[in-house]
Image (spheres, rainbow, N blue to C red):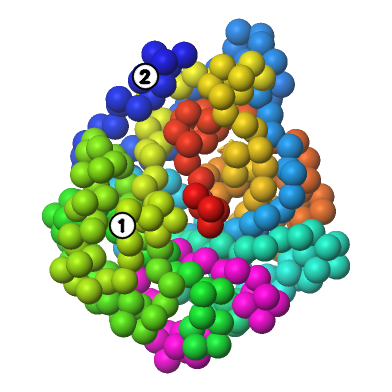
Amino acid sequence: MENLIHTVQDTNPVPKEPRHSENPHKSIRHLKEKFDDPLVTANNEPRGYVDLTKLETLWINTGTLCNIECLNCYIESSPKNDRLVYITHDEVTAYLDEIEREAMGTREIGITGGEPFMNRDIIGIMAECLQRGLQLIVLTNAMRPMMRFKEKLLPLQAQYGKQLTMRVSIDHYSQATHEDERGPGSWQPMLKGLQWLSDNNFTIDIAGRTRWGENEGDLREGYAALFTENNIQVDAANHKQLVLFPEMAPETSVPEITTACWDILNVEPTDMMCASSRMVVKRKGADKPAVIACTLLPYEEEFEFAATLSESKKRVHLNHSFCAEFCVLGGGACSVKESE
Ligand code: SF4
């Protein structure tokens, strides 16, 4: 099994033009046969699965439009991609009502995009979550779309304090590498937004990436120097404040996950994101939003459940390469619990 892990982890290619060239959704066709059957693997072994234990976190995708286009964006966000359209305040309210009505015990709402601040309902959506006492984490690139809402964000910070976390994407601690991924001119606006958040006492998490092959210690040191130099109030040694995400490289040969893998790898199914979260998306042309298994598979119909949270409590069969690569072997998660 150690060899399997090395097969996955040692193959993070340096990105090349054109942008989205390694788009996971376009390049997994050769893996389809392997992951076709939700119940058994290509070797006819029982496939691993995950049951929802409790809906701890509900992710809301605000739409895939973004002000920038990153080279390896798993959801292909760009100024043109509207495959997932803007969700409305009313649609989000209906899900929050369902959480209360069904006493689901949800503690956290995560907001992701695209760039969430491209959605004009974003402040209303944030306020709706916060006033219900839910923890709220908003994923943003901290660039101009966020800064347009400065005056409306300040009262939310003042009223709700640590209930609100802004997670800013900084792919790498160096400007050159960050801009290789995010495009020329993407560094300074991000830094300006990050400094504004820090200066105004927002709780900040940073989302970094590991795709350039540096070890974790070096990465955390690099980020720490960046934060010190710019007076950013983030502790780079803290695994909640600086989350380093493993990479999804779909062209690699990914092993399938069987029911035996949990014991072999000493991994618990309850640690997978789909054991404690779901994501709401609104597809272009759809008359209402849908609930899907997780943030990683927004376009996969097999991982879409239904329109309501109650109907989305079904078992998730791990027949996608990302299940193995990112979650079971990579140890990735979009939320980090306070205790970690
Ligand atoms: S990618 Fe991860 S979170 Fe999503 S369904 Fe697979 S195991 Fe679950």
Q: Residue at x 43, y 72 (%)?
A: 203
Quarter assignment of residue 200: bottom left
What mark, if any, has residue 140 been given in the picture?
A: none
Q: Is 302 included in the stretch rendered in magenta?
A: no
Q: Is residue 113 visible?
A: yes
Residue 339 pos. (x, y %): 53, 53
Q: Is residue 114 left or right of residue 21?
A: right
Quarter assignment of residue 182: bottom left
Q: Is residue 169 visible?
A: no
State yes or no: discs 2 and 1 in contact (Cβ < 8 Å): no
Mark 1, other Cα within 10 Å: few <14 / some 14–19 / many ≥20: many
Name the amino acid type tagged 1: Ala
Mark in the foreground, 2 or 1:
1
Q: Residue at x 56, y 62 (%)?
A: 110
Q: Is residue 255 left or right of residue 132?
A: left
User: Which residue is identified by label 2?
Assistant: 7
Residue 18 pos. (x, y %): 24, 44
Quarter assignment of residue 261: top right
Position above or below: 253 against 189: above
Q: Residue at x 73, y 37 (%)?
A: 51
Q: Is residue 280 left or right of residue 86?
A: right
Position above or below: 189 against 293: below
| Towards the viewer: 336 or 235 | 235
| Towards the viewer: 191 or 118 | 191
Which element type, helix, strand or loop, lies under badge 1? loop
Mark 2, other Cα within 10 Å: few <14 / some 14–19 / many ≥20: some
Q: Is 142 included in the stretch rendered in magenta?
A: yes
Q: Residue at x 37, y 38 (%)?
A: 247
Q: Which residues are magenta?
A: 129-156
User: Which residue is identified by label 1?
Assistant: 236
